[in-house]
Image (cartoon, rainbow, N blue to C red):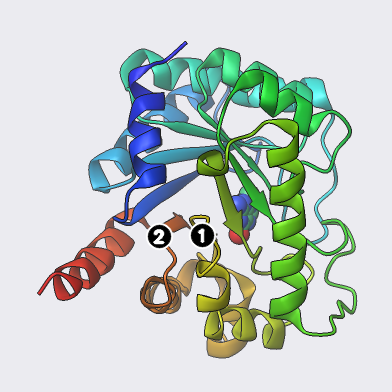
Amino acid sequence: MTTIASQVLKQHLTGTMPVIMGILNVTPDSFSDGGEYDCIDMGVQRALEMQAEGASIIDIGGESTRPGALPVNTEQEIERVVPVIEAIRQQSDIPISIDTSKPEVMRAAVLAGANLVNDVNALRAEGAVACCVELGVPVCLMHMQGEPRTMQQNPEYVDVVSDVRDFLIQRAQTCMDAGIAQSQILLDPGFGFGKTLAHNLQLVARLDELCRLDFPVLIGLSRKSMFGAILDRPVDDRLIGSVVAAVVAYGKGARWFRVHDVAETSDALRVCVAIDQA
Ligand code: 9MG
């Protein structure tokens, strides 16, 4: 079924304007103290707030992918994300992405109203590619070395940029061979996912090498530990580092930005666009 949200998403995928993806985590620690309904309500309020601040899509996740995070079972993940997706859908036509690696969660989320699958595992789980073909939704394929529990234990590459690029090209090809159109695929280098600070910096510095491929590039740098390492700041004091990195990434060709701080990132990117159009 073609909905307003999926039509709007199609325009974002083919356009050249920056697309801000607002992060909405619905893990138990995201909205402390609230009961079940408070969590849904607070999730909806935050989604609408991010839309008003300039987000073009809301990314909803029910399982933490932070280094060291423990896995969540499929039923729990569905119980966390589906009610929030349904509640946002009752109030807004904003496109929604589901941040998951599990085909069952992808299916439940899309049936509830999600329009894009954002998979940090690049659809490598059994049945994930077939599930997205069947659902007919666009996908974001992210590079990760290892798995969240252990990925920061001594990651190694021959050349991080070429290794990430080759992996993403190979995953995109697998998806296209299975029937996902090229225009439905976003690529993401996966900052912080099995990467040292030096790897992350190389990936930003040479992001143009990924942006030259025939796919839009999404970056998720917001509040990540690389800013903690460079600036020696805690996670809630990394706004300026995150916004500067988004601006640099824009200059190198990235157009999709997965962020916590929507209003500030939106202002910065609007300035970038105005300068580009001068
Ligand atoms: C879920 N998630 C956490 N970090 C991410 C990143 O950098 N990119 C994408 N696509 N998803 C992410």
In the rendering, which numbered label is found on residue 217? 1
- Distance from the alpha carbon under mark 1 to that under mark 2: 6 Å
Q: Amino acid at mark 1?
A: Val
Which residue is at 35% across, 29% downward?
94
Q: Would residue 23 be visible to someone looking at this image?
A: yes
> Which mark, residue 179?
none
Instruction: Tell me residue 124's x, y (percent).
Output: 83, 43
Residue 120 in sight? no
Toward the left, the furthest residue is 278
Name the residue beneath numbered marker 2: 255
**Whole-percent x and y of residue 86?**
49, 15
SS at mark 2 in the image: loop
* N-terminal label among 1 and 2: 1
Q: Is residue 250 above or below residue 63?
A: below
For label 1, the SS is loop
The answer to whether 15 appears left or right of 38 in the picture is: left
Disc 1 C-beta below 8 A from ligand 1? no
Q: Residue at image x 41%, y 22%?
A: 88
